[in-house]
Amino acid sequence: MKANVGGIDRILRVVAGLALIGLVLSGTIGSWGWIGLILIATGLFSFCPAYGLFGVKTCKTK
């Protein structure tokens, strides 16, 4: 797994994921908000399978 998620993208994914999970736990949205776990995981691992499928990279190349 090569990194394909860059810095700002990672931060936005983790923040959005935490927000979705917070909304689920507070009862504001339904169980679909648990998809936030996927956002957090892709942010933490710097790898998004969908980006790999479509050839997208938001990280700097070395």
Image: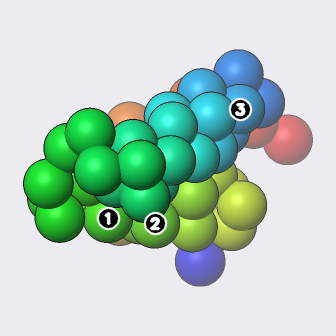
Q: Indicate left or right for 58 with 26 as reference.
A: right
The residue to which callout 1 is attached is 34
Name the residue: 41% across, 49% down: 26
For the C terminus, give its image quadrant.
top right
> Mark number for residue 11?
3
Q: Residues within 10 Å of mark 2 (few under 14, many from 20)?
A: some
Please report contact status of discs 2 and 1: CB closer than 8 Å, yes or no.
Answer: yes
Disc 2 versus disc 3: nearer the observer: 2
- Labels 2 and 3: the sequence-earlier one: 3
Q: Amino acid at mark 1?
A: Trp
List the single residue furthest toward the top.
8
* Number of the front mark, 3 or 1: 1
Indicate the quadrant where residue 59 lies.
top right
User: Where is mark 2, residue-wise?
Assistant: 37
Q: Secondary structure at mark 2?
A: helix
CA distance for labels 2 and 3: 14 Å
Judging depth in this view, the residue of 21 and 49 nearest the camera is 21
Name which quarter of the figure residue 15 lies in: top right
Residue at 71 percent across and 32 percent down: it is: 11
